[in-house]
Amino acid sequence: MPALIARTAVVDDSRRLSALLELLPASEAGSDLVSWVRRGEGLVGWGTAALVRTAGPTRFADAAKWWSEVVARATVTDEVGEPGTGLVSFGSFAFSDAPGDSVLVVPSIVVGRRGATTWVTTIESAPATAEAAAVPAASARASAPGADATALGANSARFSEFDGERWMAVVADAVERINRGDLEKVVIARDLIATLAEPIDVRAPLTRLADAYPMCWTFHVDGLFGATPELLVRRERGLVTSRVLAGTIRRTGDDEHDLTLAATLARSSKDLEEHEYAVRSVADALDPHCSSMNVPESPFVLHLPNVMHLATDVTGVARDDRTSLQLAEALHPSAAVGGTPTADAVALIAEIEGMERGRYAGPVGWMDATGDGEWGIALRSAEIVDPTTVRLFAGCGVVGSSVPADELAESNAKLIPVREALA
């Protein structure tokens, strides 16, 4: 394992000439590009200074051990001192404990922005003189005008046929099992294959997602990209936050009608039941690690361009030194992506869902050397299978009152963001 040298320097970005995603350089299929951007702020990076792949039930613990060893051996100069400065890693983890690929990667260059502050971090194992020489070049890129997203080129996508009847039968099977008392809730997911006319440049869909869904976290790690509305956990200077989403209704584009739908969603017994399971699972998972927790009694309605969700922000004060990644492990899988009871729901998913989720619905995000970081759930997402093939994902929470045709319509709505970003 190399001993890394990291240096963070402030960038003069008073004119905010570039959007963060516009700073990403061209890269073959974008495999070494990373992003975590929301409302123009966050982190982007490129290159690979260090990387580890883990799998199975110990995937989180193995990655956390590797990261602690990297941090212990690193030399860091940080003149900014914000969460996300200094040594930072980006990760994406498999949904299930079955063999599957999870990754934690340390980029060579990271550009971050928070409020009025923009910074560049260079990370490498070369001598400090070479590392220092890289900072001015990276800083110049961070303060230069970015490329117009339209200049990345147009692409077109052909989507595979989907057997909606078969998927609705799976949902009906799940409803039957719930109503006979096997479990309370299960999340059933589906995928869709897109074949592109030209090799994908992941910067294009990332830019479109960030523009269309600014309230979501636009992410990319190791070929998995998307715009998630759900923050699994944030740990920042002792404060812990988790945003829970469960209960969804599709928007119509008519603002007045959508307000009526939002009120309907807020009163829906089916959606409130689904949401209660998800909030309870998060609060129970965080309780051993947090004090002074705040769990609101009622959800609010989160309005996104394509759908509306019931949402609850659970907050607390960390009572131990668990890192953001360790908190993400404690929370995963929540009822929002697995079900209730968790073990029974995950077992049923493996039995009837009929697809390998991979890193879909797993934690994705970043962590710095202090353990602070943000981890979302990889929803509204897709995986780059090869340069011209992309696999899209969507899932729906199923409870005893679920109607299969409604769940199919909801899954179609959840596919819209990535479908539109690809084409």
Image (spheres, rainbow, N blue to C red):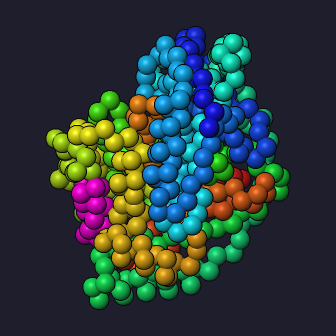
Check if residue 277 falls in the magenta segment: yes
Q: Nearer the viewer, residue 341 or 6?
A: 6
Identify the image quadrant of the N terminus: top right
The extreme right residue here reads 198
Measured along the vertical axis of the image, is residue 331 above or below residue 166?
A: above
Count of marks, rendered view: 0
Describe residue 69's horizontal placement relative to residue 370 as left or right: right
Measured along the vertical axis of the image, is residue 177 above or below residue 52?
A: below
The residue sitting at 43% across, 40% down in the picture is 374
Describe residue 94's horizontal placement relative to residue 204 as left or right: left
Image position, residue 323 (x, y; %): 38, 40
The residue sitting at 27% across, 85% down in the picture is 181
Please report the bounds of the magenta region as a residue range: 269-285
Image position, residue 7 (x, y; %): 57, 18
Residue 266 visible in the snapshot:
no
Image position, residue 415 (x, y; %): 57, 61
The residue sitting at 55% across, 40% down in the picture is 90
Q: Nearer the viewer, residue 384 or 47?
A: 47
Measured along the vertical axis of the image, is residue 341 above or below residue 296?
A: below
Image position, residue 130 (x, y; %): 71, 16
Residue 138 visible in the snapshot:
yes
- Judged by its main secondary structure, the magenta piece is helix
The residue sitting at 49% across, 77% down in the picture is 350
Describe residue 411's horizontal placement relative to residue 275 as left or right: right
Check if residue 178 falls in the magenta segment: no
